[in-house]
Structure formats: C-alpha cells, structure tokens
Amino acid sequence: WKVFAPQHLTSEQLNGLFRDRAGEVEVLDWHAYPSYTIPQKLSPFVLDGGREGSGIGAGHGEGHGEGSLLYLNAIEQVASAMEMSVISARNAANLVVGFVDARRSQDC
C-alpha cells in the first residue's frame, strides 16, 4: 500500500490504518508535493510582457498582452500530478484558441 502523510506515521498510526501489517515499512520523502499555507500567493498561469488587452486571456477579465508566455506548471502549486499537467495543457490550448479567434474577429 502507499500512504501519503505530512509527517512520518508511527507504528500505532499504521496499525490503525491496516488490519494485518505484514512486511516492511519503507518511507520515501519525494519532495514532490505542494506545501499548502493560508494565505498562499500563487504564480500566474499567463506571464505577460506585451500590450494590454490584446494577447492571450484578453476578453476573459485578464489584460494579457500580445506574445504572452504561458506558465503551465503554475498549476503544480495547487496539486502535483501528471493529470494536472494535462489539465494545464488543455487550459493553455483553450487560451490560445480564444486569442486566435479574437484576432481573427478584429481583422475582419
């Protein structure tokens, strides 16, 4: 079994989780999971260096400039898993599609 905990579990705690504990307990500290604090300042998903209101995220309550840079790993501050990276990539694709559609409608 695999158990995630903020600190090492004692034998008593493990006995409370498992009925029959046969075998060895191995503790691995991956340092791969987010540390939650309140309040927590999160990195932005869209890193902007361009003009106001013309780039990715424009028209969605965010004034991000042309040539915006997307920071897909920002989501890992909240939850770290392969599935979260897929969600982040999907969000990036949606932002790019929205940006392209907005540019096309401006050019018409």
Image (cartoon, rainbow, N blue to C red):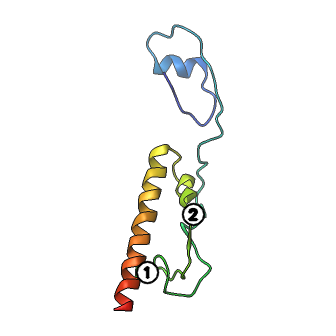
Q: Position of residue 77 (x, y in %)?
A: 57, 54
Q: Is residue 66 left or right of residue 57?
A: right
- Please tell me how crowded label 2 is: few (under 14), some (14-19), or many (20+) other residues with Cα within 10 Å: some
Q: Nearer the viewer, residue 91 or 3?
A: 91
| Residue located 60% across and 54% down the image | 37
Query: Who comes first in sequence, dot 2 or dot 1?
Result: 1
Count of numbered badges drawn on the protein: 2
The amino acid on which the numbered mark 2 sits, given as a three-letter code, is: Tyr
Pointer 2: what residue?
A: 71
What kind of element bears circle 2?
loop
The answer to whether residue 103 is above or below residue 77 is below
Q: Quadrant of the C terminus?
A: bottom left
Residue 61's label in the rendered image is: 1
- Please tell me how crowded label 1 is: few (under 14), some (14-19), or many (20+) other residues with Cα within 10 Å: few
Q: Is residue 103 left or right of residue 9?
A: left
Tell me where residue 49 sits by quadrant: bottom right
The answer to whether residue 14 is above or below residue 47 is above
Kindly report the distance in space between the C-alpha atoms of the residues bearing marks 2 and 1: 18 Å
Tell me where residue 42 sits by quadrant: bottom right
The amino acid on which the numbered mark 1 sits, given as a three-letter code, is: Gly
Q: Position of residue 89 (x, y in %)?
A: 46, 57
| Residue located 34% across and 87% down the image | 105
| Residue located 58% across and 51% down the image | 36
Closer to the observer: label 2 or label 1? 2
Q: Nearer the viewer, residue 55 or 34?
A: 55
Q: Position of residue 39 (x, y in %)?
A: 59, 62
Q: Nearer the viewer, residue 108 or 12?
A: 108
What kind of element bears circle 1?
loop
| Residue located 46% across and 76% down the image | 57
